[in-house]
Amino acid sequence: MSRAAPGRIRPCTVADVPGVVDLYNRCFAARMTLDRFRWQYLDAPGARPDLSVVYERGGKVRGFVGAVVLPWWIRGRRVVAVRIQDVCVAPEERGRGVFSAMLRAHCALPAPVDLRLAFPNPRSRPAFLRNALFQPHPDIGVLRCDVETIRRAADAIARPCAVTVERPPRFTATDGAFLEARRRDVDAHGARDTRWLHWRLGPGAPHDYLVARARVGDTLVGLVVAKFYAAGRTIDLVECATGDRPDVAATLLDACVDALSHTRPEALETWAGRGYGGTARFRRLGFVDDERSTAMVTRCSPGIGPGPALTWLLSPADSDVY
Ligand SMILES: CC(C)(COP(=O)(O)OP(=O)(O)OC[C@H]1O[C@@H](n2cnc3c(N)ncnc32)[C@H](O)[C@@H]1OP(=O)(O)O)[C@@H](O)C(=O)NCCC(=O)NCCS
């Protein structure tokens, strides 16, 4: 921060929240509300607002590095994972190392964090790699499928199940048990705990999530949690537990498109890694690699990784809470 103005970098406090929300709304096209910010940074199970970092100058918050705690299990072990997100610096402070310094300050906090991950954009990516020793994961990317492809896939099959779509969703004990069972089918998985999913899909959650359930008789055979963004033009697949049943997957995804038809969705998207089995299933449905340059970066404690195995673990794991 050689040319930086004499500001102060420190952990975020509850009193900073209105200033951070104002700053966010100056820096991003998307709108942040106080309620939404509190929901994800203060109300989440295990939330640690003090792991987020602010840059303050002249009594005003002018920089923010958000840290959201993700309660994960990796290789049978509970780990503290933190997603770095919502990073922004006021326009008048940019280009003099404020973000880089905040990132280093966050990494130096005395907190037992096993894994930090982020999905930077081209403006923030260099600082992650140069200043805070994050590792890139070029084999994790965005898979994308236009809605017409899913429509055709669904039209081509006899519907194997009945589908219901719920929005806003209410995540149930049955949903939790279904996801847990699906995860047991996979040898190793970066699964999050269901308490966290209950919070994210519970009554206080923002209304841009939906849950689609597929049943044969009374038995749940598929579950999709989706979030829509870009004013509903893109449907982001948060959880897609359909097993090796492309017919169930096509029916569920088609139902998600139907449920959002008023917003004229154009595509479905999901994060996926090349080595992960679920990726092949998405490809069979017509998903293809998106050209987007954003990719995951991570910084791990020595016990966890990095390496191809870590990439495999992370690839199906959604961590998107904005
Ligand atoms: C992305 C963003 C947070 C970067 O903030 P910033 O404080 O300008 O970032 P930094 O100053 O640390 O780094 C940016 C560049 O400034 C220059 N810089 C950094 N430290 C410097 C210093 N001490 N002296 C001179 N120049 C410096 C470098 O060119 C640096 O590029 P590099 O990372 O390739 O080295 C800011 O541009 C922003 O808020 N953008 C809008 C929101 C956004 O897109 N957020 C990212 C979401 S993923």
Image (spheres, rainbow, N blue to C red):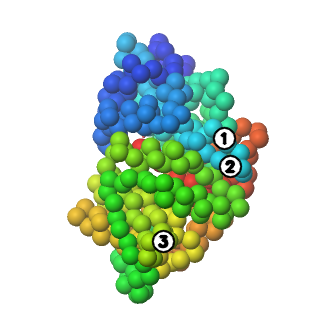
Looking at the image, the residue that sits furthest to the right is: 303
Q: Secondary structure at mark 1?
A: strand
Q: Amino acid at mark 2?
A: Ile
CA–CA distance between discs 2 and 1? 7 Å
At horizontal 58% and vertical 57% (from top left) the residue drawn is 180
Residue picked out by circle 1: 79
Q: What residue does disc 3 label?
A: 219
* Residue at left offset 39%, top offset 36%: 39
Circles 1, 3 touching at the beta carbon (< 8 Å): no
**Which SS class for mark 2?**
strand
Cβ–Cβ under 8 Å for marks 2 and 1: yes
What label sits on residue 253 in the rendered view?
none
Dot 1, how many residues are within 10 Å of its Cα: few (below 14), some (14-19), or many (20+)? Answer: some
Separation (CA) of disc 1 from disc 3: 32 Å
| Left or right: where 177 falls relative to 233 | right
Q: Quadrant of the C terminus?
A: top left
Which residue is denoted by mark 2 in the rendering?
74
Which amino acid is tagged 3? Thr
In which quadrant of the rendered view does residue 71 lie? Answer: top right
Residue 286 horizontal side relative to residue 193, left or right: left
Q: Could you tell me residue 231's position as x and y percent?
A: 28, 54
Q: What residue sits 31% from the left and 49% below the top?
A: 207
Question: Which amino acid type corresponds to the residue marked 1 in the rendered image?
Answer: Val
State how far apart marks 3 and 2 are (Cα).
Answer: 29 Å
Q: Earlier in the sequence, mark 2 or mark 1?
A: 2
